[in-house]
Image (spheres, rainbow, N blue to C red):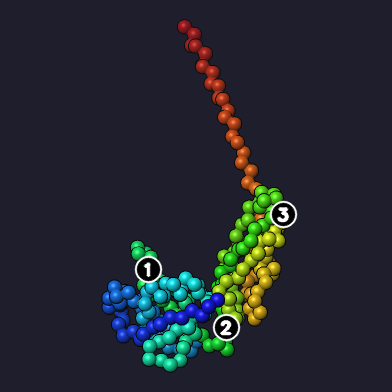
């Protein structure tokens, strides 16, 4: 993955006044980290949206704060969105130390085609969307790729223990938890209409 970068400036506008920052196309953000006080910055919205989409919650981002010589290494840990416009209204950035392991939820991407789908009409179920891992920031992957080409038959599955993790990445998930599985094809039972015959009651005697 290419290096992702963001430009930020120190934020002096706080509280409810940040509304005018958003109107100007800026997103208020806070930088925090292990044994670090929180710092307020602001980031251009469009750039933040693009980088956050690419990095997810585990991809490393180089943050350049105006007036500082050193680049900060951060993770976009949380983006809060406006419920109506779906635009980001706040960001939490976690500053890491490159020599200290971190824990992150890394997305799982399924690739390839399971032979069981074509040969046995099976259905591939995605049972796990993210996996919790620990690694040094420089080793943390943006995603874990899972190849489906080994699923040849119905009931074949891939568990956490089967994942090929990059060097230096340790899974914190249950090794027996299933990531994906091939289910048997769904059987559709056609309902046959049943004719109900109702007999008329006997006529009353006169």
Q: Is residue 115 left or right of 106 when viewed as pictured?
A: right
Looking at the image, which residue is at 36% across and 77% down?
44
Tally of numbered tags: 3
> Which residue is at the far bottom?
69
According to the image, label 3 marks what residue? 153
Q: Position of residue 189 (x, y in %)?
A: 62, 39
Is residue 106 at least partly visible in the picture?
A: yes
* Vertical position of residue 110 compared to residue 155: above or below: below
Categorize mark 2 by other alpha carbons within 10 Å: few (<14), some (14-19), many (20+): some
Residue at 55 percent across and 87 percent down: it is: 98
Helix, strand or loop at mark 2: helix
- Say which element carries label 3: loop
- Which residue sits at x=43%, y=86%? 64
Sequence order check, earlier mark of 2 and 1:
1
Is residue 33 among what the camera can see? Answer: no
Q: Which residue is mark 1?
A: 87
Q: Earlier in the sequence, mark 2 or mark 3?
A: 2
**Residue drawn at 45 percent across, 84 percent down:** 63
Inter-mark Cα distance, 2 to 3: 38 Å
Query: Left or right of 38: which side holds 172?
Result: right
Which residue was labeled with disc 2? Answer: 138
**Which quadrant of the figure has residue 7?**
bottom left
Is 86 on the left or on the right of 145, as rendered? left
Q: Quadrant of residue 103?
A: bottom right
The answer for how far apart the CA atoms under marks 2 and 1 are is: 29 Å
Q: Could you say where residue 40 lies in the image, as x and y percent from the top left?
A: 37, 84
Label 1 element class: loop
Whole-percent x and y of residue 81? 39, 69
Disc nearer the start of the sequence (1/3): 1
Quote the CA–CA distance across marks 1 and 3.
44 Å
- How many C-alpha atoms fall within 10 Å of the one at disc 3: few (<14), some, or many (≥20)? many
């Amino acid at each position: 993955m290419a290096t992702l970068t963001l430009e930020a400036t120190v934020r002096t506008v706080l509280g409810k006044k940040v509304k005018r920052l958003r109107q100007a196309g800026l997103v208020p953000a806070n930088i925090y980290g292990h044994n670090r006080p929180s710092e307020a910055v602001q980031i251009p919205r469009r750039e933040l949206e693009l980088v956050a989409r690419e990095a997810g919650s585990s991809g490393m981002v180089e943050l350049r704060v105006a007036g500082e010589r050193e680049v900060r290494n951060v993770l976009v840990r949380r983006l809060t969105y406006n419920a109506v416009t779906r635009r980001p209204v706040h960001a939490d950035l976690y500053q890491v130390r490159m020599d200290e392991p971190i824990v992150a939820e890394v997305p799982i991407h399924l690739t390839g085609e399971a032979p069981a789908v074509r040969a046995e009409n099976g259905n591939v179920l995605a049972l796990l969307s993210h996996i919790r891992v620990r690694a040094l920031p420089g080793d943390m992957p943006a995603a874990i790729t899972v190849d489906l080409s080994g699923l040849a038959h119905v009931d074949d599955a891939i568990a956490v223990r089967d994942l090929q993790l990059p060097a230096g990445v340790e899974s914190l998930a249950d090794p027996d938890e299933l990531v994906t599985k091939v289910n048997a094809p769904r059987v559709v039972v056609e309902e046959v209409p049943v004719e109900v015959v109702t007999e008329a009651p006997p006529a009353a005697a006169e």
